[in-house]
Image (cartoon, helix red, strand yellow):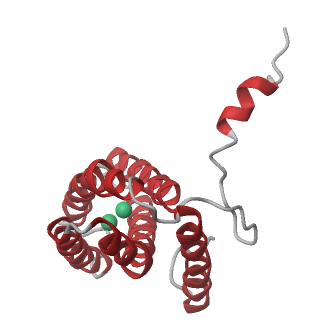
Amino acid sequence: MLTTNTPAKRSKTETKTETKTGTKTPQDAIGMLTADHKKVKKLFKEFEDVADSKATASKAELAEKICMELTTHARLEEEIFYPAVRKAIADNRLMNEAEVEHASAKDLIAQIQALPASDPMFAAKVTVLGEYIDHHVKEEESEMFAQARKTKLDMMALGEEMMRRKEELSASNHAEGTGDPRH
Ligand SMILES: [Fe+2]
Ligand SMILES: [Fe+2]
């Protein structure tokens, strides 16, 4: 039996290009942010699988990944995406709420990063962060992104700008030596 990929089926999935460092595949801003949302959701699920176990190293590693991903994601939104959308959609209430949610998430992230994974409150904090992000992401995707798509915003140009900033941020993260030493 043939198990090779059928070209017709592959072309559909190839629109979701994984961008690795160094490659500059153009991506639209909303596509990029939505891909981040999916990635972090998966990391939270992985965390839930070990949350009640004694796998302290796995918990620490996953939580650090989650915090790094979210920190970069929030910066891209705050520095580039949100200001552009705020101007385009004229819905300050929605944008203000999103920024307040970011501030609370960042506060929780700082608490998690200051805590050893062996702390009895560690898993609870990561779980609550997950619930919080889940709510925030739903609002972004169903309200903010939906409204932004109806405007004339150039999502490809915004995506390109965000991609450049993401590369800068990841380079400075590596230079600081934060993150998992195995990577
Ligand atoms: Fe956000
Ligand atoms: Fe987001």
Instruction: Identify the image quadrant of the N terminus.
Output: top right
- The answer to which of 115 and 88 lies nearer the viewer is 88
Q: Residue at x 53, y 65 (%)?
A: 154
Q: Nearer the viewer, residue 133 or 121?
A: 133
Q: Nearer the viewer, residue 105 or 47?
A: 105
> Which percent across, then down, holds residue 127?
24, 56
> Residue drawn 26% across and 52% down?
143
Q: Looking at the image, which residue is at 58% across and 63% down?
A: 156
Name the outermost residue toward the top. Answer: 1
Q: Based on the displayed image, in which of its 4 quarters is residue 75 positioned?
A: bottom left
Say how many tags the image has.
Answer: 0
> Looking at the image, is 153 positioned above or below residue 108?
above
From this view, report whether residue 54 is shown above or below residue 182: above
Q: Quadrant of ligand 2?
A: bottom left
Which quadrant would the C terminus be assigned to in this image? bottom right
Q: Is residue 129 left or right of residue 183?
A: left
Pinpoint residue 128: horizontal percent, then vertical percent: 19, 58
Task: Specify the quadrant of the image occupied by residue 161.
Answer: bottom right
Furthest-bottom residue in view?
176
Q: Residue at x 73, y 34 (%)?
A: 11
Q: Position of residue 106 (x, y in %)?
A: 27, 77
User: In the picture provided, is 60 more to the left or to the right than 35?
Assistant: left
Does residue 4 lie above or below 74 as drawn? Answer: above
